[in-house]
Image: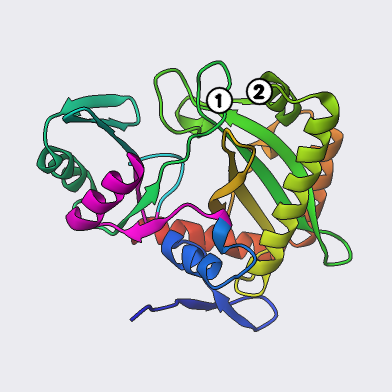
């Protein structure tokens, strides 16, 4: 049985509360249009980990509740061994039991997911994904207000900026992978259109007026939705000077401030009770 947690937003309607990566994944599985854009994802167990690592060769094990790239494991099958990374730690072990022992010592009984690893197109040998910020505009329609690529820090398996990742333009990332200027612009248009479709899908289930989407590009040019952030951190708003796109993003955040602040409060609540 799957339990969906509801909360009341400013206009009195009941919507799904932000937080659970598993609940978000189920929303995608229910969408014929989007279900093929997400990596295979299962609730964590030793048996599931064994099945997924045998099927894909590389998986990510992550908390159902959590953010910032913390407590995320990348498990990669090698010849007779497993390479495991978590944040700045790396181990090469000979048995799956050793992998499970490390994961279980970190998760301490909390629920985790196992997600298929995607062979991402890289930048200077580092994994990259793209963050799009999608917000409701003055007319209540979804609009992509920010778009940038995130490259993993040296030796890291995840791209989160707070643990050492770095930002670059999507255009620079695409062109470093052999895209022409015209092809890069076409890919960016597809990326924005996909982001709006995702926001529309989630907009009927959550109360949010903003989403942060992490989208990966594989070596064949396919976009994969890695994660939906229902309360993305927007540290750019703390800068003294904002770009034009940042100013618009901040304006729209304030326009729907009551709903956005409620999502922030619930994000903190989920993290305290994960």
Please tell me which residue lies in front, 85 or 245: 85
The segment highlighted magenta reads 37-65
Query: Is residue 229 visible from the viewing direction of this image?
Result: no
In the rendered structure, the answer to whether residue 251 lies left or right of residue 71 reads right
Check whether the beta carbons of the residues at disc 2 and disc 1 lie within 8 A of each other.
yes
Q: Residue 225 at x, y = what percent?
A: 57, 50
Q: Which residue is drawn at 45% across and 59% down?
A: 21
In the rendered structure, the answer to whether residue 6 lies left or right of residue 175 reads left
Q: Residue 209 at x, y = what percent?
A: 71, 62
- Figure quadrant of the C terminus: bottom left
Q: Distance between the residues labelled 2 and 1?
A: 7 Å
Q: Residue at x 46, y 68 (%)?
A: 23
In the rendered structure, the answer to whether residue 115 lies left or right of residue 255 reads left
- Figure quadrant of the N terminus: bottom left
Q: Residue at x 31, y 33 (%)?
A: 86
Label placed on residue 214: none
Q: How was this image coloured?
A: rainbow
Q: Is mark 2 on a helix, strand or loop?
A: loop
Q: Residue 125 at x, y = what percent?
A: 51, 18
Image position of 273 with respect to 106: above or below: below
Query: Is residue 267 visible from the viewing direction of this image?
Result: yes
Graded by Cα atoms within 10 Å as few (under 14), some (14 to 19) or many (20 or more), the crowding at tag 2 reads: some
Q: Which residue is drawn at 10% across and 43% down?
A: 97
Please tell me which residue lies in front, 273 or 127: 127
> Which quadrant of the figure has residue 236?
top right
Graded by Cα atoms within 10 Å as few (under 14), some (14 to 19) or many (20 or more), the crowding at tag 1 reads: some
| Residue at mark 1 | 122
Please tell me which residue lies in front, 273 or 149: 149
| Residue at mark 2 | 177
256 part of magenta stretch: no
59 part of magenta stretch: yes
């Amino acid at each position: 049985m799957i339990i969906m947690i509801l909360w009341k937003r400013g206009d009195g309607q009941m919507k799904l509360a932000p937080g659970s990566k598993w609940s978000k994944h189920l929303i995608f599985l229910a969408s014929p249009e989007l279900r093929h854009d997400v990596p295979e994802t299962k609730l964590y167990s030793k048996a599931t980990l064994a099945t997924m690592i045998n099927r894909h060769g590389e998986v990510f094990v992550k908390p159902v509740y959590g953010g910032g790239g913390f407590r995320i494991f990348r498990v990669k099958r090698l010849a007779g061994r497993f390479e495991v990374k978590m944040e700045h730690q790396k181990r090469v072990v000979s048995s799956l039991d050793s992998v499970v022992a490390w994961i279980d010592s970190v998760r301490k009984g909390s629920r985790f997911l196992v997600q298929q690893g995607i062979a991402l197109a890289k930048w200077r040998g580092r994994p990259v994904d793209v963050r799009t910020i999608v917000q409701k505009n003055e007319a209540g329609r979804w609009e992509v207000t920010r778009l940038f690529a995130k490259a993993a820090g040296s030796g890291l398996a995840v791209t989160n900026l707070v643990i050492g990742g770095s930002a670059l333009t999507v255009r620079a990332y695409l062109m470093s992978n052999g895209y022409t200027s015209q092809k890069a612009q076409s890919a960016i248009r597809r990326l924005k259109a996909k982001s709006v479709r995702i926001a529309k899908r989630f907009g009927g289930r959550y109360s949010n007026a903003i989403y942060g989407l992490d989208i990966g590009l594989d070596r064949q040019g396919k976009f994969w939705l890695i994660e939906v952030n229902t309360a993305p951190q927007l540290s750019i708003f703390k800068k003294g000077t904002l770009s034009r796109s940042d100013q618009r993003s901040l304006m729209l955040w304030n326009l729907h401030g009551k709903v956005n602040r409620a999502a922030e409060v619930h994000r903190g609540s989920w993290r305290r009770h994960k």
